[in-house]
Image (cartoon, helix red, strand yellow):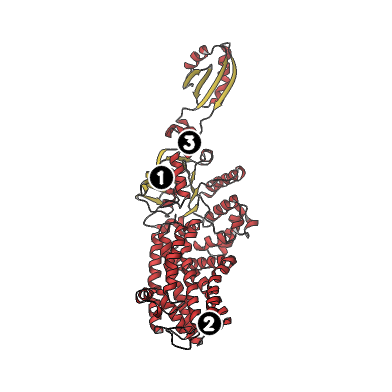
Amino acid sequence: MTQDAIRVENLTKKFEDVTAVDGVSFGVPSGELFGLLGPNGAGKTTIINMLSTLLAPTSGRAEVAGFDIAARKDDVRRSIGIVFQEPALESKLTGRENLEFHAMMYGIGKAERRARMAEVLDLVELSDKAGTLVEKYSGGMKRRLEIARGLMHRPQVLFLDEPTLGLDAQTRRHIWDYIRKLNKEGGVTIILTTHYMEEADYLCGRTAIIDHGKFVALDTPDKLKDILGGDVVSLEIEGDPSRLLEALERTAWVKTSKLHDGVLSLTMEKGERRIPELINKAQALGLTVACVNLHKPSLEDVFIHFTGRTIRDKEGGVEERNRMIMRSHGRGPRGGRS
Amino acid sequence: MISGTAVYVLWLREMKRFLRAKSRVVGALAMPLFFLAFLGMGFNRMAVPGMGGGVRYIQFLVPGILGMSLLFSSTMAGLSVLWDREFGFLKEIMVAPVSRVSIVVGRIAGGTTTALIQSVLILGISFGLGFKVINPIKFLLGLLFMFMIAVTFIGFGLIFASKMRDMQGFAIVMNFVIFPLFFLSGALYPLENLPRAVRILGYADPLTYGIDGLRGTLAGVSSFPIALDLGLMAGFSVVMIVLGAYFFEKSESV
């Protein structure tokens, strides 16, 4: 047993002319909730597919739960649970039958199976729908059933590929809380992919920002945001703000200061705690603050900082759209990459 | 190597799917039954050329239609991997810690069972149309032939499924592979009546020996010795399954 739940070295996957994953290396310690954040088509799902033995890497190597993904596939498979981006349920079976299928494929005995099915169904609040055919389930119910299924065999490592994609706000929040609980109380190592900034921010211990198959940054969401130099506080001043600007330039905790169109724009850490002080300083100089605006940097800002574009821009980009089209039409020469 | 539980649960899934999709069963039975009913009635008064005298066409036709039903439903069972890939369930199967051989065996077990159930239903109906089984012991041998036809063409379907990325190639397989295999197998007429060049193609068609074996065991008329049919079909079954499993394992599931 190694300490790291996942160790990846120089992992690369090429699909004919496209390099979907380009020499990625990282490690995930046991018990971490690790995020892969990036736009659609960045290579997140391809990484998950390789780590879960569904795709063979073009080059590089990786270990999951201490087992090499190429040499010891069955050991890897036994150690992981996975919730796929697109539902991977049998719609002609009921919820319970889907879980039963899974449990039997993982060699869980009958009594144990019963107990665990009841447990996970209760957890995702599907107990009363367990006897319904999955084809009658809503999107949120399918996803919850998938999560329940991924937990049936008590995996050491759980992969969640866009777990809240297309879900309503309430269900999303519910699943977030559940994922957290699982990680904190169950001690399960979780690898989560998402293109929702707030999801990575809310859930992940450390997050890798991935773009065009490469990691552009990897740290905790807070530290990633610190790279941007802290919060932005904007002050709208009645009167001439130049004296205030001079005073603030001499203040240690103000990192940068700018004046444009009568608005002072300052960066600092813990902006919300500095606002009263800023107002006092203005009043001491006989100035009135008409308006204050505090902007906390988001992972979205971090993404822009590293890639020069917003994550939504990327999704709307021509290249990205073409990939999406390729995927939906005949799924490309080898479909299902993202 | 082979996990009994995995094979069982994959088989069970096929059974449940089969029983819950009544329209699929009706659809799968309709075509063979139409062939049987209309060809059987239409050619009822004709002697079968090349089969000696005294053989009623219905006796000749029923084994052919059973072979046809087995060909279609088994190839479909093999190709159903494509559906699983399309709807994502293949991923759930492929990440499970069971040997790939178990997965192939489970699929074959499920596909064979559903194909055999359909054939037995057709056989039951054909009794109503005047078909007679010559010998109950040989009838059991006939069931073995049905089994071998099913296994052969599931392997065949798996090979095609591994080479296709989506269902768009499906119509091509139907029109350019399955139908020729059906017509070349002598299901509707004795191969002896075909021109020499075409007949040779027929002799390369595994279904020819399957249907001939069924004819020999169920109706008592056959072009080749039953032992030859049996030997060749056993060979085809093994080869196609090994190839099918090989290609299935090679193909990617995402």
What residue is at 58 percent from the left and 18 percent from the top? A279
Report the chain holding disc 3: A
The x and y percentages for residue A48 are: 44, 49
The residue that label 2 is drawn on is: B44
Report the chain holding disc 2: B
* Mark sitting on residue A324: none
Task: Examine the rendering and report whether any part of residue A122 can be seen.
Answer: yes
- Crowding around mark 1 (Cα neighbors within 10 Å: few <14, some 14 to 19, many 20+) is some
- Crowding around mark 2 (Cα neighbors within 10 Å: few <14, some 14 to 19, many 20+) is few
What residue is at 53 percent from the left and 78 percent from the top? B42
Circle 2 sits in a helix, a strand or a loop, which is it?
Answer: loop
* Label 3 to label 1: alpha-carbon separation: 30 Å
The residue that label 3 is drawn on is: A313
The residue that label 1 is drawn on is: A27
The x and y percentages for residue A106 are: 49, 61
For discs 3 and 1, the disc positioned in front in the rendered view: 3
Q: Nearer the viewer, residue B230 or B250?
A: B230
Q: Nearer the viewer, residue A36 or A284?
A: A36
What residue is at 43 percent from the left and 32 percent from the top? A308
Amino acid type, mark 2: Asn
Q: Is residue B216 left or right of residue A172?
A: left
- Sequence-first disc among 3 and 1: 1
Task: Examine the rendering and report whether any part of residue A4 can be seen.
Answer: no
